[in-house]
Image (cartoon, grey):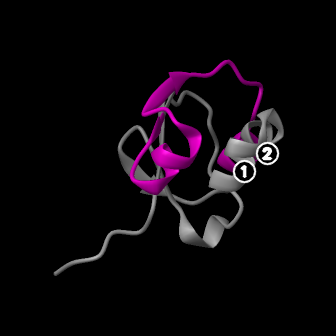
Amino acid sequence: MEVLYFAWVRERIGLPRETVETDAKTVADLVEELRAREARYAAAFEDLSALRVALDQELTDFDASLDGVREVAFFPPMTGG
């Protein structure tokens, strides 16, 4: 699946996107796999309350299933102004 990173998440990881092979069942499982990769991922996913996630461009929760998902996007909450 394609994993996209936006804003400071992208800055911490150093990539805008990557293709990930995973056996993760949920977004939370995927996050744990990514955190275990190396320090830059651990830093990006340190505080999940500061992140939002979208599956195939639909906002969802970290306990959402990845079954059939093609794209996961991680980004900070948006603010208006």
Camera-near label (1 vs 2) is: 2
Residue at the far left: name it.
81
The secondary element bearing badge 1 is classed as helix
Q: Quadrant of residue 79?
A: bottom left
Residue 43, placed above or below residue 14: below
Label placed on residue 32: 2
**Can residue 8 be seen in the rendering of this structure?**
yes
* Image position of 24 (left or right of 20): right
Residue 24 at x, y = what percent?
75, 33
* Image position of 58 (left or right of 44): left
Q: Amino acid at mark 1?
A: Ala
Count of marks overlaid on the render: 2
Residue at the far bottom: name it.
81
Start and end of the magenta stretch? 4-31
Residue 72 at x, y = what percent?
50, 38
**Towards the viewer: 50 or 69:** 50
